[in-house]
Amino acid sequence: MNQQLSDPETRLEERARRKAAKRESKKTEIAVSTLDALKRIGYANTTMRDIAAHSGMSLGSLTYYFTDKAELITYCVRLYKSEFIGRIEDAVRIHHDTGKVLDSLAEELARSITDDLSTHRLWYDIRSQAMFDPAFRPVVAEIEDKLKETVGIALQAAGMQDEYFSQLGYAMLDGVFRLLLQNTSGDEQQHEQLVRQLRSALTGIVQMKSSSS
């Protein structure tokens, strides 16, 4: 009797899982299309109607998945940054020699500037917006905490001996990354120059020592 009761329950649970997976897949599809629209139009100038049109959806269909622009942008930024963080982790994980870690990290950061220029600019746009719009503060804090953790681990793998400097190292690298982002066109020819600049910055960061040392 218990088995007879559990079978319909199992089928209902499986159906719910499939429905949730399908919904998540659609949201990811919309997010990818939204990122493309935002990269072309910019956050401030993009409306939900623009995004719906770019995604080939009605506005009603779009709001079925995302109630407003803030929720949609939050999902997009979280999706992209999780991929970016994963690539940084992979770049560090494959090496044990500190010099090779630095090379791999510089290469990945330079590649990301070249290939994902507009998306990173969107992140900095949203991070700035969070100072004025509370809707973005939780996701910005969540992503930034993960970035600090990931970059801190990467810097230690690259030779930073004093864990005390991890957050300072993150702030310094973030500043360099943003400056390079602002001053590049994303041209493939700039890639090697970006690698050299990032490698030099990373070397300086990991060599920081306390004045009392």
Image (cartoon, rainbow, N blue to C red):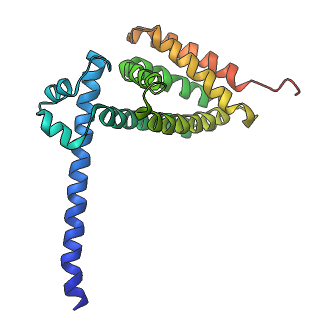
Q: Is residue 104 above or below residue 82?
A: above
Tell me which residue sits at (59%, 22%) in the image.
173
- Is residue 73 left or right of 179 when viewed as pictured? left
Q: In x, y percent, where is residue 153?
A: 62, 38
Whether residue 161 is visible to the viewer of this picture, yes or no, is no
- State left or right for residue 156 relative to residue 162: left
Q: Is residue 163 left or right of residue 133?
A: right
Question: Where residue 63 sits in the image (x, y, percent)?
Answer: 20, 38
Of 138 and 149, nearer the camera is 138
Residue at 59% over, 39% down: 149
Above/below status of 15 relative to 43: below
**Extreme residue in the bottom direction:** 1
Looking at the figure, which quarter contains the C terminus? top right
- Residue 106: which quarter of the image? top right
Of 47 and 30, nearer the camera is: 47
Q: Position of residue 23 (x, y in %)?
A: 22, 49
| Residue for point 44% across, 19% down | 113
Q: Is residue 131 visible?
A: yes
Could you say where residue 46 lies in the image, as x and y percent from the top left? Answer: 25, 21
**Nearest to the observer: residue 213 or residue 96:** 213
Q: Nearer the viewer, residue 45 or 146?
A: 45
Total marks in image = 0
